[in-house]
Image (tube, helix red, strand yellow):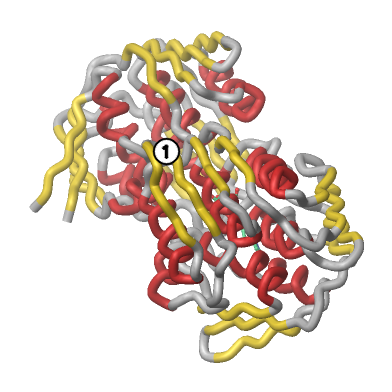
Amino acid sequence: MDRIMVEKSPPLKGNVRISGAKNAALPILAASLLGTEDIILEDVPKLKDVEIMCEVLTSLGSKVDYLDEGVIRINSAGISNYETSYELMSKMRASFLVMGPLLTRMGKTKNSMPGGCAIGTRPIDLHLKGFRALGATIDIDHGNIGAYTEKLVGDKIYLDFPSVGATENIMMAATMAEGETIIDNAAMEPEIVDLSNFLNKLGADIKGAGTSTIRIKGVKKLGGARHSIIPDRIEAGTFMVAAAITGGDVVIENVINSHVKPIIAKLKEAGCTVEEGIDSIRVIGNSELKAIDIKTLPYPGFPTDMQAQFMALMTILKGTSMVIETVFENRFMHVDELKKMGADIKIDDRSAIIKGIKQLKGAVVKASDLRAGAALVLGGLVADGITEIENVYHIDRGYDGIEAKFTGLGAVIYRKND
Ligand code: UD1
């Protein structure tokens, strides 16, 4: 099993280029099942999750070719299968995103309940509510979920919560439904906009992505397209926090500044200097950073996917910080690990109170999920001694070349294989 070793590092300095967004690449790969001509995707991050999604596509009959670094060609003209295997589904929750495309393309789909990060119960009721509204019959049996339909017909769907995955799945299913589908209280994340732009390039008719009302007019057929994945705002945010926590000076390149507004605001509030370029952001930390509070919310609020990394920062800020997690009900699994490093954190339900301490100490810790793993890397950069991170496969699911990028900024980080 791989472990990532992080040693106390000097203030990070230099430039780092952000990869394409995992959370845009995965739904766009799933949406590639809808196209009947060649699809070329660029800036696809090199991640375990992307590999799994490509395996899912291949298992369904798509042809997937890696053309160049970050460039994938997909042709789904001949897809023949409508069932995903338990083995692939259990590896990653996002595999469930093939359900919408398969339902609309094949009229049927069967999948097992999705796996992925253990950050709450993560139900799929809203996805299914959408499919039912479009006319599908849902059949749940022994952990398998089937959806069947003679034909999908557009409808008005109100999401009780602006779920990212449900918005994407329903949007994809609606692309070839008869008539118009309106999704109200839709998620507004930039990754939804990227998916919508991609689908429109294939020939779909989607308006309003990025707002809370998305209108999809069904079309008969989708074709091919070339599309570049947007930069990963969470990877960008992770390196911004790395600059802050180490008191460094880092230029983050290939970032869409408007996507990381809450991260910029909170780092400034803590006392960092943040300079915005056109598609780059420079973050300069210092030794006098002070406590801040964050509350996670759907976009454009503070992203839950940055909560753990900010908590790592808060452990050494001057004063007492608070985190309120409103998106997932069980997303504090990094707390026990940060405590092993000496952090002073108390949890009460969905709130955490973090009293800043002078110095974290290296320890053997476990990455319980993807972003929790990133938080431990950040803590390790400023902890005395060596931090040894286990279960790094979680980190590999979402960070493309994490050691190389950190090493390029002067961090002491390496992988050990037992
Ligand atoms: C996506 C992201 C993930 C991010 C999350 C929230 C991908 C591949 N993953 O996950 O990194 O942390 O958005 O920004 O894009 N919910 C329901 N019923 C449903 C669906 C969701 O109650 O049918 C609830 C979930 O339990 C959770 C909340 O809605 O409490 C948010 O989940 P959702 O937005 O769906 O997250 P994902 O799409 O799974």
Instruction: Give the answer, above or below, for where 135 lies relative to 42.
Output: below
Q: Position of residue 96 (x, y in %)?
A: 56, 67
Instruction: Give the answer, above or below, for where 142 lies relative to 180.
Output: below
Q: Nearer the viewer, residue 167 or 284?
A: 167
Q: Position of residue 379 (x, y in %)?
A: 31, 33
Query: Which residue is rendered at x = 44% and y = 56% of the image?
Result: 64
> Is the C-beta of the residue carrying label 1 under 8 Å from the nearest atom of ligand 1?
no
Instruction: Give the answer, above or below, for where 65 lies relative to 342.
Output: below
Left or right: 125 as drawn, with respect to 276: right
Q: Nearer the viewer, residue 181 or 74?
A: 74
Query: Which residue is rendered at x = 26% and y = 40% of the image?
Result: 341
Q: Position of residue 291 (x, y in %)?
A: 50, 24
Left or right: 205 as drawn, with respect to 299: right
Instruction: Give the answer, above or below, for where 339 lies relative to 321.
Output: below
Image quadrant of residue 91? Answer: bottom left
Residue 297 appears in the rendering = no
Residue farthest along the bottom direction in this orientation: 141
Query: Which residue is rendered at x = 42% and y = 26% of the image?
Result: 239
Residue 92 appears in the rendering = yes
Q: Where is mark 1, residue-wise?
A: 70
Query: Which residue is rendered at x = 84% and y = 44% of the image?
Result: 207
Q: Helix or strand or loop: what does disc 1 sit on? A: loop
Left or right: 405 as drawn, with respect to 61: left
Residue farthest along the left direction in this orientation: 418
Q: Position of residue 402 (x, y in %)?
A: 31, 35
Image quadrant of residue 388? Answer: top left
Left or right: 119 as drawn, with respect to 185: left
- What is the quadrant of the N terminus in the image? bottom left
In the image, what residue type sits under mark 1?
Gly
